[in-house]
Image: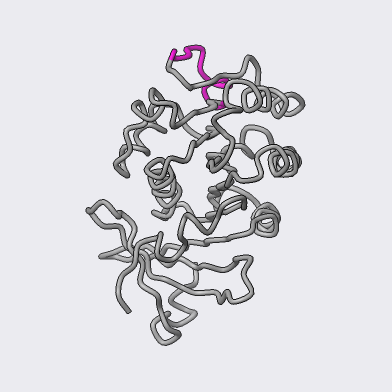
Amino acid sequence: MPMEDIFEVLPLERIAGVTVSVIYDAYSSAWQVLFLFIRKALQMGYFTVISNYSVPLKSLMHRFNSVGVNPHEALENDKLAIVDVFGSRYSPVREEIKNVFYLDKVDPETINPKIDRIYLGPLRDKLTGNAMRMIYTLDGASIMLGEEQTLKLLNQTIAHKSISFPESTLFLPLNADMVSKRFVAWISNLSDYVLLAKSWIREDHVKELLYFIKAPHPDFEPAVYSLRVSKGREKIMLKKLSAPELGSPAEEER
């Protein structure tokens, strides 16, 4: 089977108005899949909003750079907005950057209304029509707020935004090694599309598989792909595997 890029497996045009989760482990490269989708969305004129719970703002910018996106340019040109929850919670210094928003205080009781005020205020007109939203990351949110609170807040977010911004797509990256199996199961159940990545560290290489396990289409069949990180612009290349290529169960034990 020939190598494919992620957009041949899951075209951006097919996922308007749905929730997509990408679940991976500690050593996986699949976190880049989300940033490749953002790059594609920006190229197609989608407005993108990221709620950052996981890393300092500068580190988030580096992740954009790793897939060939200039985040400062996208922010300046009103193509991208960032709600920096991580910086709001942990940093006393707040950079004055266009379309980067901060919260005065971060707590489970008020965080959703505060983010809603940003969505329904300065970002409202930009979010009409095709748009992308990403919670980066769910494991970061669960460490900050607790798993139970994160699930409750996520349920509220999906219910509210499905009415306020019905054409927008929500991406949910999740490092499964950081949370409980119950949390992962709930996210999988909540999502319309589920991509699951698993990695194995070998002496001379890293083996990585991407499982496409859920989609809301009557003709959908789960599939497994080998995942390779390339130096080119595509970054993530996939090869669909047949049953004999998958390896023995013992090889895939973790």
In the rendered view, would you say 113 is above or below 153? above
In the rendered view, would you say 104 is above or below 61? above
Q: Quadrant of residue 42?
A: top left
Asked whether residue 252 is drawn in magenta, I would say no
Q: Is residue 31 left or right of residue 1?
A: right
Q: Position of residue 223 (x, y in %)?
A: 50, 74
- Residue farthest toward the left in the current orientation of the protein: 231
| Total numbered badges shown on the rendered structure | 0
Q: Position of residue 178 (x, y in %)?
A: 57, 47
Q: Is residue 68 left or right of residue 122?
A: left
The colour scheme of the drawn protein is one colour
- Residue drawn at the location 55% of the way across and 47% of the way down: 171
Q: Is residue 7 left or right of residue 23?
A: left
Q: Is residue 245 left or right of residue 137?
A: left
Asked whether residue 94 is drawn in magenta, I would say yes
Q: Quadrant of residue 204?
A: bottom left
- Residue farthest toward the bottom in the current orientation of the protein: 244
In the rendered view, would you say 104 is above or below 60? above
- Residue drawn at the location 61% of the way across and 50% of the way down: 17
In the rendered view, would you say 240 is above or below 203? below
| Foreground of the two, 27 or 236 | 236
Instruction: Give the magenta part as a residue range.
Output: 85-96
- Residue drawn at the location 50% of the way across and 68% of the way down: 211
Q: Position of residue 107 (x, y in %)?
A: 70, 24
Q: Quadrant of the N terminus?
A: bottom left
Q: Position of residue 134 (x, y in %)?
A: 54, 41
